[in-house]
């Protein structure tokens, strides 16, 4: 029964997948971009700027449910389709979106009652992997209902999921490699410029995204002013022959000093040798 149902459903699943790809400019675009969308949704809920949290494990159970809500919102915005009877109106179908940070999804009665399609998103945050598939939520694919009437997918029914991608890496966390215990301590240090200077002293040669600096300087109205010259961390560190280089403005110096490549919104600090200091003085730093 399941095997024959899967054959019947294949055309519908293929149609939904094809529409997803068409709306964003192709399968390659969708597969490349969607892990970034998942990462953005997770970061939105974790809210590192206000909370200094960086991991899903630091959320309570209620907060974890919000990840699925943001994944749904960000996906709908990404593909540019309206909300229908379910989460998306796609390829003339009402499509539910279900997210899990575990290893299964809970399908509500209104979706499986009429064997409706579901987009399934799985986020393994510790391993920093994600998967996305589509299934027709047939009752024969599902386990017994819980107290809310929702039903998880039987393990043997995973073969009926049309996977768009599986175990694709999420973008590396912008906080990777930072001592987060120390980061939280620095957030309590008075004086935004002094705080930024100390952070860059302790994290030499590490590309740092501006959103990390915003989290560090969460209580400053103009947080980037605390990093720049004219009284900011850059002026403080100049007295120590230490520079804060911008990936946007100082790409040539970053390359000359053999520092890690920085993107446009990243910064890296470096203690200059005598020769390097001469280069800094002769540049527009």
Image (cartoon, grey):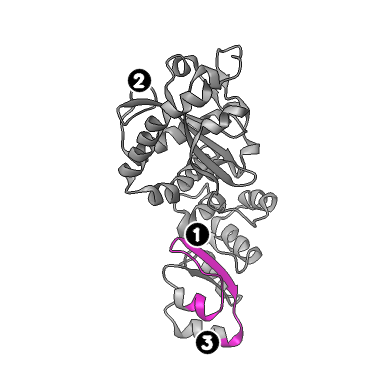
Query: Do callouts 2 and 3 mark residues in contact (Cβ within 8 Å)?
Result: no
Residue occupying image coordinates x 56% and y 78%: 258
**Mark earlier in primary sequence (2, 1):** 2
Q: Which residue is mark 2?
A: 85
Query: Do callouts 2 and 1 mark residues in contact (Cβ within 8 Å)?
Result: no
Q: Residues within 10 Å of mark 3 (few under 14, many from 20)?
A: few
Q: Nearer the viewer, mark 2 or mark 3?
A: 2
Question: From the image, which quarter does the C terminus lie in?
Answer: bottom left
**Residue 146 horizontal/vertical position (percent):** 61, 14
Residue 113 vertical placement versus 198 (above, below)? above
> Horizontal placement of 119 versus 152: left or right?
left
Q: Which residue is mark 1?
A: 226
Q: Nearer the viewer, mark 1 or mark 3?
A: 3
Q: Which residue is mark 3?
A: 278
Q: Residues within 10 Å of mark 2 (few under 14, many from 20)?
A: few
Determine the CA span between mark 2 and mark 3: 66 Å
**Mark earlier in primary sequence (1, 3):** 1
Instruction: Specify whether residue 267 is painted magenta.
Output: yes
Residue 136 visible in the picture:
no
Span colored in magenta: 253-275
Determine the CA span between mark 2 and mark 1: 48 Å
């Amino acid at each position: 029964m399941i095997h024959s149902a899967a054959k019947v459903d294949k055309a519908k699943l293929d149609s939904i997948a094809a529409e997803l790809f068409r709306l964003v400019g192709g399968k390659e675009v969708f597969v490349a971009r969607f892990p970034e969308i998942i990462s953005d949704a997770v970061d939105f809920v974790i809210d590192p700027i206000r909370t200094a949290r960086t991991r899903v494990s630091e959320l309570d159970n209620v907060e974890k449910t919000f990840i699925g809500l943001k994944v749904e919102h960000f996906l709908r915005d990404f593909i540019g389709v309206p909300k229908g009877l379910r989460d998306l109106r796609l390829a003339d179908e009402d499509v539910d979106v279900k997210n899990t940070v575990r290893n299964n999804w809970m399908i509500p009665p209104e979706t499986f009652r009429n064997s409706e399609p579901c987009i399934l998103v799985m986020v393994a945050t510790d391993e920093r992997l994600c998967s996305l598939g589509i299934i027709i939520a047939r009752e024969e694919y599902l386990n017994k209902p819980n107290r809310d009437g929702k039903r998880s997918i039987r393990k043997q029914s995973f073969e009926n999921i049309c996977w768009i991608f599986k175990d694709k890496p999420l973008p590396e966390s912008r906080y990777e490699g930072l001592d987060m215990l120390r980061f939280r301590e620095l957030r309590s240090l008075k004086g935004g410029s002094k705080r930024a200077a100390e952070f860059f002293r302790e994290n030499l040669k590490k590309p740092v995204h501006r959103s990390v600096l915003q989290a560090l300087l969460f209580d400053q109205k103009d947080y980037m002013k605390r990093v720049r010259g004219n009284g900011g961390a850059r002026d403080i560190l100049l007295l120590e022959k230490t520079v804060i280089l911008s990936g946007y403005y100082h790409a040539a110096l970053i390359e000359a000093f053999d520092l890690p490549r920085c993107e446009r919104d990243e910064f890296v600090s470096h203690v200059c040798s005598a020769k390097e200091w001469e280069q800094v003085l002769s540049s527009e730093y």
